[in-house]
Image (cartoon, helix red, strand yellow):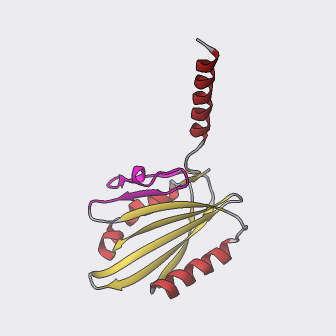
Amino acid sequence: MNILQTKRILGVLALAGLMAGCGKPYKAATPDGFIDLSDRYESAENDEYRAATADGVVLGIRAYKNEPKVEMGVAIQALENRVRLGQGYALIAEKDVTARDGTKGKMLQFGHDEPRGPHLYYVTLFITPKRVFVLEAGGKKDLVEAAEKSIDWSISNFYPE
């Protein structure tokens, strides 16, 4: 093996090591009855997770750097304003939630009437010193209500890293 081949191999190994350190800064929990669609959303700059049922209930997770630092109260108010005022949803409920590692979060449950019938949209926030995690669930009202235990399970088994 010559020096050029050795350098190429070392370069490939170094790149593979860097790529192994990349990835989502969380572990999603896909409930039974949902299909993990994350492979359709993977890219170098994208930390998205998506899963869906055959009926159209969708789960999503996004991670953002917590810069500038945000407090839960401010984040909740901004989210509520955006969804209620900007998108026409009504706030139905707000509840405390806990991730698998003990991180505390808040879930906001919104409703919206559409020509195809009422829809529900649940948004959960977890905030750590490094990241803001946004977990979403939504779909037709009757289908989301039927999947509520699975949605709750995915949130309580979510693991922010």
| Residue at image location 59% in from the left, 28% down from the top | 13
Q: Give the percent coordinates (x, y) of residue 7.
A: 63, 23
- Give the vertical position of 17 relative to 8 (above or below): below
Q: Give the percent coordinates (x, y) of residue 107.
A: 53, 71
Position of 68 with respect to 2 (left or right) is right
Residue 104 or 34: which is nearer the viewer? 34
- Would you identify the image quadrant in which residue 22 lies? top right
- Would you identify the image quadrant in which residue 71 lies? bottom right
Whether residue 28 is in magenta: the answer is: yes
Q: Main secondary structure of the magenta part?
A: loop
Position of 36 with respect to 25 (left or right) is left
Position of 106 with respect to 130 (left or right) is left
| Residue at image location 62% in from the left, 56% down from the top | 102
The span shown in magenta is 27-54
Q: Residue furthest top?
A: 1
Dividing the image into 4 quarters, which one contains the N terminus?
A: top right
| Residue at image location 51% in from the left, 58% down from the top | 156
